[in-house]
Image (tube, helix red, strand yellow):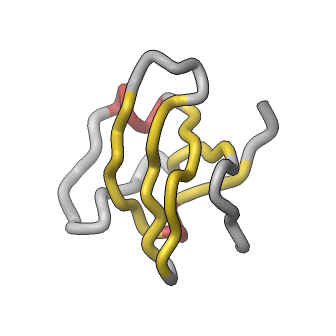
Amino acid sequence: MDFNIGDAVKIAPDATYYTGRRMSPLIQSLTWEISSISGDRVVLGKSVDGYYTLNAPVAAKYLTKTII
């Protein structure tokens, strides 16, 4: 799937950070805005509700575009 900076995405329940480290259920439950993309490495910036900032890379295979 093609992603663009600014897209809103949901994270799959089995997702890990790009480094392989597990994510917390809170992080996985939120909808995130993409802040940068490099190949299959997608950096998630802020949550769309504006309460959280992540700035962490995730493999694109774990993400699904969503409409907010």
Left or right: where 12 falls relative to 68: left
Q: Residue at x 58, y 34 (%)?
A: 31
**Nearest the eye: 67 or 37:** 37
Q: In terms of image quadrants, where is residue 45?
A: top left
From the image, which quarter does the N terminus lie in? bottom right
Q: Residue furthest bottom?
A: 39
Residue 21, given in percent of the width and then of the height, sits at 18, 57
Q: In terms of image quadrants, where is residue 68?
A: top right
Left or right: where 14 falls relative to 35: left
**Nearest the eye: 11 or 41:** 41
Q: Residue at x 54, y 39 (%)?
A: 32
**Nearest the eye: 17 or 41:** 41
Residue 6, given in percent of the width and then of the height, sits at 66, 49
Q: Residue furthest right?
A: 67
Q: In terms of image quadrants, where is residue 51?
A: top left
Q: How many marks?
A: 0
Q: Tell me: residue 10, above or below residue 36.
A: above
Residue 25, given in percent of the width and then of the height, sits at 35, 31
Q: Residue at x 66, y 54 (%)?
A: 64
